[in-house]
Image (spheres, rainbow, N blue to C red):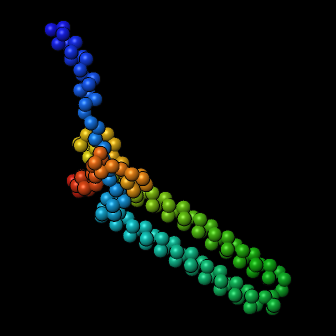
């Protein structure tokens, strides 16, 4: 009996090493591009960007109109009126710059907020496939990994897509 226990203790570590770890790889860009949620979010973000662009264009058109009017009437204005108009033009230019910066920040925030649930869903699907398949690592090829062996690593892109479809 002692010999049996001793043999089990000695060979148990070897049995653990005999199991080859499983590695997987996928392309998250390919997966995300097929997600209907991403298509919806892209449409919403494009609409938001277009609105910001239109607002800035209207402000720039107003600045150009006022600057052209100023240039046209400058010679007939007294010095006080010239300075007031120049100050107004500079203020309008600063408003445009501030609006551009604010719109940029708001767009980035909206993009992060809208993409977070999609990214979380994708990561949950990858984790579920990894856990179910017993994978040690699942690497993302779209992240710029220079080489992944097709013989030592399994492409799990289709499995993750299937898992995403289950999550709907």
The answer to whether residue 52 shows anywhere in this view is: yes
- Residue 18 on image: x %, y %: 25, 31
- Residue 165 on image: x %, y %: 23, 56
Q: Residue 116's image quarter? A: bottom left
Q: Residue at x 83, y 81 (%)?
A: 80
* 39 on left or right of 101: left
The answer to whether residue 125 shows anywhere in this view is: no
User: Foreground residue, 142 or 67?
Assistant: 142
* 117 on left or right of 155: right
- Residue 160 on image: x %, y %: 27, 52
Q: Residue at x 24, y 22 (%)?
A: 12
* 72 on left or right of 118: right
Q: Residue 111's image quarter? A: bottom left
Which residue occupies the extreme top position in the image?
Answer: 2
Q: Residue at x 26, y 28 (%)?
A: 16
Which residue occupies the extreme right position in the image?
Answer: 79
User: Foreground residue, 54 or 147?
Assistant: 147
- Residue 107 on image: x %, y %: 49, 64
Which residue occupies the extreme left position in the image?
Answer: 1
Give above or below for 66 relative to 139. below
Q: Residue at x 23, y 42 (%)?
A: 132
Q: Residue 94's image quarter? A: bottom right
The number of numbered badges drawn on the structure is 0
């Amino acid at each position: 009996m002692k010999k049996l226990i001793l043999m089990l203790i000695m060979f148990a570590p070897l049995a653990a090493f005999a199991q080859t770890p499983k590695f997987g790889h996928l392309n998250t860009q390919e997966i995300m591009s097929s997600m209907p949620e991403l298509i919806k979010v892209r449409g919403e973000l494009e609409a938001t960007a277009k609105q910001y662009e239109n607002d800035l264009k209207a402000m720039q058109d107003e600045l150009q109109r006022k600057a052209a009017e100023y240039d046209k009437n400058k010679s007939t204005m007294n010095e006080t009126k010239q300075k007031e108009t120049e100050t107004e033009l500079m203020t309008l230019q600063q408003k445009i710059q501030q609006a551009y910066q604010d719109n940029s920040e708001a767009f980035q925030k909206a993009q992060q907020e809208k993409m977070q649930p999609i990214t979380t869903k994708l990561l949950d699907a990858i984790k579920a496939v990894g856990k179910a398949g017993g994978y040690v690592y699942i690497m993302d090829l779209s992240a710029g990994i220079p080489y992944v062996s097709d013989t030592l690593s399994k492409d799990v892109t289709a499995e993750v897509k299937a898992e995403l479809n289950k999550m709907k």
